[in-house]
Image: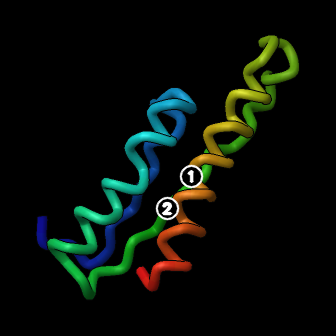
Amino acid sequence: VDAAIYVIDSVPNMSADQVAERAEPLIRQLRAARPETPILMVESIIARNAWIREGKENETDKKNAHLRAAYEKLIAEGY
């Protein structure tokens, strides 16, 4: 897709393991195909009712941490 910007906002629809496994390869694939197109990686918000749903807040924190780790690794490599 020839886009002005790629917005990666998939964290709410993925498990923490999926984020850890898929975020970095996706960014690498996009960057290889479109080296000049900006990529915006969006962390998930903590839902207001997360305190009711046991473990939900912790799971979101894990997903965001995996996304941030992928971001930091890619930046360190010059992406």
User: Badge 1, how many Cα within 10 Å: few under 14, some, many 20+?
Assistant: many
User: Badge 2, how many Cα within 10 Å: few under 14, some, many 20+?
Assistant: some
Amino acid, disc 1: Leu
Amino acid, disc 2: Met
Residue at x-position 73% and y-position 21%: 56
Location of residue 6 in the rendering, given as x and y in whole percent from the top left corner: 33, 66
On the image, numbered disc 1 is attached to which residue?
Answer: 67
Q: Which mark is residue 43?
A: none
Q: What is the image's colouring?
A: rainbow
Residue at x-position 33% and y-position 54%: 25
Residue at x-position 19% and y-position 77%: 34
Calculate the distance from the C-alpha at mark 2 to the C-alpha at mark 1: 8 Å
In the rendered view of the protein, which quadrant contains the N terminus? bottom left
**Does the CB distance between marks 2 and 1 fall below 8 Å?**
yes
In the shown orientation, is residue 36 left or right of residue 42? left
Location of residue 33 in the rendering, given as x and y in whole percent from the top left corner: 15, 72
Residue at x-position 42% and y-position 50%: 23
Q: Nearer the viewer, residue 20 or 41?
A: 20
Q: Earlier in the sequence, mark 2 or mark 1?
A: 2
Residue farthest toward the right in the current orientation of the protein: 51
**In what element is the residue under mark 1?**
helix
In the rendered view of the protein, which quadrant contains the C terminus? bottom left
Location of residue 29 in the rendering, given as x and y in whole percent from the top left corner: 23, 62
73 above or below 35? above
Mark toward the viewer: 2 or 1? 1
Location of residue 64 in the rendering, given as x and y in whole percent from the top left corner: 65, 46
On the image, numbered disc 2 is attached to which residue?
Answer: 41
**In what element is the residue under mark 2?**
strand
In the shown orientation, is residue 53 left or right of residue 43? right
Residue farthest toward the front in the current orientation of the protein: 77
In the shown orientation, is residue 21 left or right of residue 1? right
57 above or below 26? above
